[in-house]
Amino acid sequence: MDWNLRHCSRHGHATYAPDEPALRERLHVTTPAGEAWRCLRCGDFAVGGPAGSGPADAAPEVPRGRLLRDRVIMRLLACERAFKALLLLLLGVGILRFRGNKDAIQSAWDADFPLLRPFADQIGWNIDGSFITRWAQDALGLSATALAWIAVGVFAYSALQATEAVGLWMVKRWGEYFAVVATSVFLPLEIHELMNKVTVLRVLALAVNIAAVVWLLWSKRLFGLRGGGTAYHAEHAEESLLTVERAAARV
């Protein structure tokens, strides 16, 4: 896939008129349809005036090629984090609602649960040993204070996931660091849960998080890896079409 053309087809060309005459000449042509400026993303000439102008050093950073692909991956990760943040937020609200109506729910459980036993016996379901029953009884046994603290923890985790989502979606350097640290902190807990019980969902969640950490560390050169931030920014500069054209204009 040509990521440059894909992005330009959806968002338009990124044209820029630099003040430097030699560089400006390399990015501008005159056609029968009028003036045309070279797109800093896909390299094609687009008829019409430039989207921006000014000194070349003030030109906006236009990601190209692999950098665009990386941006798509980061935004997919951001969507996954945002989805988890929303689920956690709803769970926290549910816990608070449960805390406020615990007495009524306890009364309904005590009244209705025995009625389910004859039906469970007919279908061969050990309802007393079911994880649903154990989970419900554990939840009903928690105090209001314990439920409040659980809700606080869930909301805090939701905020953590939301912060990751924002940083990754905006493709910020701090977001990359934050995502790696926040995800790595919870990896031991995920591994521990997987050792207690293997489920498809837990395996997939662990695989996604490990892959995300490894990919961010390697591709974004975090924590000094592969040259660190200096090499990362140099790589961005080398990918810039404006940098290439500026070098050619000096020849």
Image (tube, grey):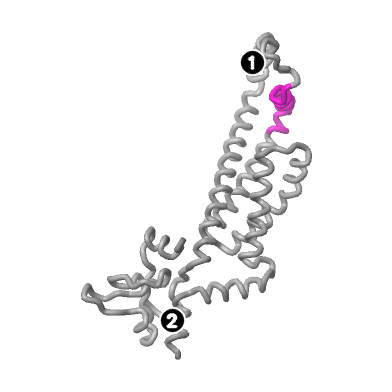
Mark 2: secondary structure: helix
- Whether 248 is drawn above or below 141: the answer is below
Categorize mark 1 by other alpha carbons within 10 Å: few (<14), some (14-19), many (20+). Answer: few
Name above or below for residue 95 compared with residue 155.
above
Q: Residue at x 57, y 36 (%)?
A: 90
Q: Is residue 53 left or right of residue 79?
A: left
Q: Which residue is mark 2?
A: 245
Name the image quarter holding residue 40. Answer: bottom left
**Residue 83 counted in the magenta span:** no
| 18 horizontally vs 97: left or right | left
Q: Which residue is mark 1?
A: 108
Furthest residue toward left: 32
Which part of the image, by quadrant, shows the C terminus? bottom left
Sequence-first disc among 1 and 2: 1
| Label 1 – label 2 distance at C-alpha | 74 Å
Q: Is residue 111 visible?
A: no
Q: Quadrant of residue 117?
A: top right
Question: Do labels 1 and 2 touch, CB within 8 Å?
Answer: no
Q: Which of the numbered marks, if any, corresponds to residue 69?
A: none
Q: At x 65% / y 45%, what residue is drawn? A: 205
Reply above or below: 55 against 60. below
Majority secondary structure of the magenta segment?
Answer: helix
Which kind of residue does numbered mark 2 sit on? Answer: Glu
Residue 15 at x, y = what percent? 37, 71
Residue 211 in picture, x, y percent from top left? 65, 54
Identify whether 69 is placed above or below 251: above
Q: Position of residue 173 (x, y in %)?
A: 59, 64
Label 1 secondary element: helix
The answer to whether one can see residue 23 in this image is yes
Q: Bounds of the magenta span?
A: 130-147
- Amino acid, disc 1: Ala
